[in-house]
Each structure stands twice: as C-alpha cells, then as structure tokens.
Image (tube, helix red, strand yellow):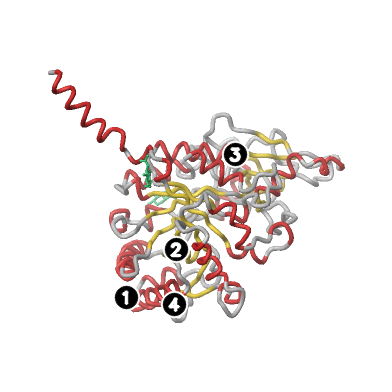
Amino acid sequence: MAKFLFFLATICMVHCFSIPSTNASGRAVFCYYDSRSYLRETQAKMLPSDMDPALSFCTHLVYGYAGIDATTNKMISLNENLDLSKGHGNFRVVTQLKKKFPNLKVLLSVGGGADLEDSFKYNTLLESPESRASFIISASVLLKNNEFDGLDLAWQFPTIKPKKIRGKLGSFWHGVKKIFGSTPVDEHAEEHRSQFSNFVLELKNALRHDNMILTASVLPNVNSSIYFDTHGIMNHVDFVILHGYDYMTPKRNPKEADFTSPLSELMKRNPESNIKFLINYWLNNGFPAHKLILAIPSFGRAWKLNSDSAISGVPPTPADGPAPEGPYTKHEGLLSYPEICTKLNNPANQKGMHSYLRKVLDPSKRYGTYAFRNPDENEAGGIWISYEDPESAASKVEHLKNKGLAGLAIVDLSLDDFRGLCTGNKFPILVAAKYGL
Ligand SMILES: *[C@@H]1O[C@H](CO)[C@@H](O)[C@H](O)[C@H]1NC(C)=O
Ligand SMILES: *[C@@H]1O[C@H](CO)[C@@H](O)[C@H](O)[C@H]1NC(C)=O
C-alpha cells in the first residue's frame, strides 16, 4: 500500500506540477500596432521606436493592416508610403525590431476593419479557388520579402446589425427597432463559412514551407457561429484571437451608451454581447483552449449625453451620438487611454464648471469601468465613456487564465499610454495585463 502511494506521488511529481497552464512565461502576449498611428499628430503619433518599452512584454507583434485588391484578389499594402521601402518602409522597420528582441515574432494582419473600400470583397474572395490562390501567393511573397513571421487573418466578415433592447427604457426604443434588424444580410453565409475553412487550410499549407504562423482574428460584431467552423479550422491555425470589445459603439449604437467590452452578461441586454459568451462559444464547440487568445482594448468609446440621459450615469443610458474627438487621436467617439486619464484627474481641467469626469469603478469585476459628466443647462459638455483601465484588463486576464486560454492580445499599443502621461509609467494597460498572466 505504501509502495502504491509512493508510486502515485511519483507520478504526480512528474505530471501534476508540469501543467503548462500554470507557467506564466508559456502564455502568449500579442501586441497590435496600428500603423495608422504614425499619421496622427503630436502626442498620438507613434513611431515604431516608441514601441521599444513594450516589446519585452510581447511574444508577438502584429502589424495592422494590409488589405485586399478587389480586382486581383492580391494582398496589398493599404498605404504604400507608410509600409513600403519607397516610403517610410515600416513593414521592414518593424520586422527589423527582431534584431533587438530576438524572441519576438512579427505578424502582418490583413483586414482588421481598416480596409474600407468594397466591404464585400472579403466574402467574394473566398468563393473561388483561383481568387484564394491569388491571395495566398501574393501574401506569401509580401510576408517573405518583408521578413514577417506570419499572417493574422482579421477577415472582414459582415457584422451583425446593432440590436436594440427594450426594458425600462420602454417606448423610447420603439421607433428605433423598426430600422434595425438582427440578422446579417449575407445569404450565402454557410458557403462562406466552409470556404473560409478551405482557405485557412490552403493558406496554412503554403505558409508551412516557410515555418510561418497563421492566426485568425474574430473581429468585433462578427458572429462566430455564422462564420467560423471551429472543427474546420482548428488544426490549421496556430491561434484564434477573440476581439471581445466594441459590443456597443457610438457609431453602431448612437442613441444608447453602454459598456463596450463587458466580461459577463449584462441584465436585460443581448445575452451574446459579452466576453464570457464569446469564449464559451469557442470552447463549447471543441476549439482547444491552448489556441485561444483574448484581445483586450486599450481605448474607450465615448458618447455625448443630453437631457434625456440618466443623471446617475448608470448604463444603459440614452445618448446623443459620438462624443467629440479627442485632442490627440482626433476620432469622434473614440478616446485613447491617456486622453481618458487626463480628463479624469488633470488639474488643468478644473477651470470650467464641468471639470472632472466622475469615474465609476466596477468592484464586481464583471462589466468594466466608466466615467461621465452630465451636460450643463445648455446641454453642453455631457460625456459618457466606457473604457479599459489597468484594473479591468487584469480582471479579464484572470478570467482567461481560469479558462486555460493561451494568452492575451492588446489592441492596440498606440492607444495605450505609450508616453506615460497618466502616471509616468509607459504602457500601463499592457503591463498590468502581462503581470496578471
Ligand atoms: C515555462 O515555459 C517556457 C516556454 O514555454 C519554458 O521555456 C520554461 O522552461 C517553462 N518554465 C517552467 C518553470 O516550467
Ligand atoms: C449568431 O448566429 C446564430 C445562428 O447561427 C444566432 O442564433 C444568433 O442569434 C446570432 N447572434 C447574434 C448576436 O446575432
């Protein structure tokens, strides 16, 4: 008996303590770099060299974004002056960061919502073996010539239509409901789904020769169950990256401000609009946890409040479209983390009547952080922001660890506080997420 127990203990010493999910250094950290940040001005302009302090925290750097030429079905640069050597040559500048960070893998991402012309071309390309081959050949060449280590398919599938909720807001939504449906317009969704699986297989076969990584990103508001056949792709991708944010945005949902990236299901909302639902969909459909990555945003979504909005700020609250652009990113309805933190506690903001934004934390760690300021008597200055901060990012990391996922992604480095304007520490969201792993 004693011998048997000893035998069990020995087995346990060998196996029980080597479960990889407890090895923090074994998890992946995908850092997205949106190359368009190079074109922003002043504090928001990010050069590849500004990434240096982040890169020792990243296992993978993902350059966004390449696109598709609708006529030839080739993968192309969306901004040749930015990406190619006849201009700033950032494709190469970024892959050359591997000299300084030898363990870093650098991927190129295609799509990502950045390819704005002809939104149907992503579906059309899937439909014939010839167009898929054209993409695959051109992608291999572009990746190899620029020394990338792989490709991220951030495929621009049609997104679900914004769904309106009823409930305590009652009649307020009646008119809106008629305008929006809840089903995608793609009548060939089933074909596109199986063609995408073929595409992934063909692509992996081509990239395998060069030892290249292949990942697929599930973009915000793309319905996984419509476009991703978990069994069809699981053996051919290295990772699937779940972009669990932008469930609510001022552009899609101008009349209603709400949590944009909740971990758990919100009362009286769409039960599918949260991260737990997304992760569970993939796991329940047999996709291996060790290939799943959760993408965490580094930015906030901001709505304008008006006199119909709840004075308490408690979401969901009626709103009046996107809040004005931030001083640096200059994109209405979107604020980078440093643009938010300086609104919260910058003494320079105290001049006006409506100085501070009130920050509302989430001790339950289920929904996320928000901040708001009610409008004044002239209906001016009202704003409501749902955003990620280091604490909420850490809660998401805790969850992905409990689920045994492969790691996290930060979307994106240029919207994190890369200059250290909030507290003096650079990349606070990335660093908090990484330390939580
Ligand atoms: C953790 O994982 C890394 C990479 O997979 C490996 O090199 C390292 O030896 C592991 N550490 C432990 C303590 O198992
Ligand atoms: C996603 O698609 C499934 C059908 O495949 C449907 O039941 C579900 O309601 C859709 N989700 C959303 C949020 O539209």
- Amino acid bearing label 1: Pro
Instruction: Look at the numbered disc 2 and say if its residue's Cβ is closer than 8 Å to ligand 2.
Output: no
Mark 1 neighbour density, 10 Å: few (under 14) some (14–19) many (20 or more): some
CA gap, disc 3 and disc 4: 49 Å
Mark 3 neighbour density, 10 Å: few (under 14) some (14–19) many (20 or more): few
Q: Is residue 403 left or right of residue 12?
A: right
Which residue is at a point 41% across and 44% down the rendered structure image? 279
Label 1 sits on residue: 129
Label 3 sits on residue: 170
Residue 83 visible? The answer is: yes
Mark 2 neighbour density, 10 Å: few (under 14) some (14–19) many (20 or more): many
The reply to whether the C-beta atoms of the residues labelled 1 and 3 are less than 8 Å apart is no
- Amino acid bearing label 2: Trp
Mark closer to the chain start, 2 or 3: 2
Label 4 sits on residue: 74
Q: Quadrant location of residue 123?
A: bottom left
Percent from the top left, x then y, of residue 327?
75, 55
Question: Which numbered circle lies on residue 434?
Answer: none
Instruction: Look at the numbered disc 3 and say if its residue's Cβ is closer than 8 Å to ligand 2.
Output: no
CA gap, disc 1 and disc 3: 49 Å
Of the residues tagged 2 and 3, which is closer to the observer?
A: 2
Q: Is residue 111 above or below residue 179?
A: below
Which residue is at a point 52% across and 47% down the rendered structure image? 296
CA gap, disc 2 and disc 1: 17 Å
Mark closer to the chain start, 4 or 1: 4
Mark closer to the chain start, 2 or 1: 1
Of the residues tagged 4 and 1, which is closer to the observer?
A: 4
Q: Is residue 120 left or right of residue 171?
A: left
Mark closer to the chain start, 4 or 2: 4
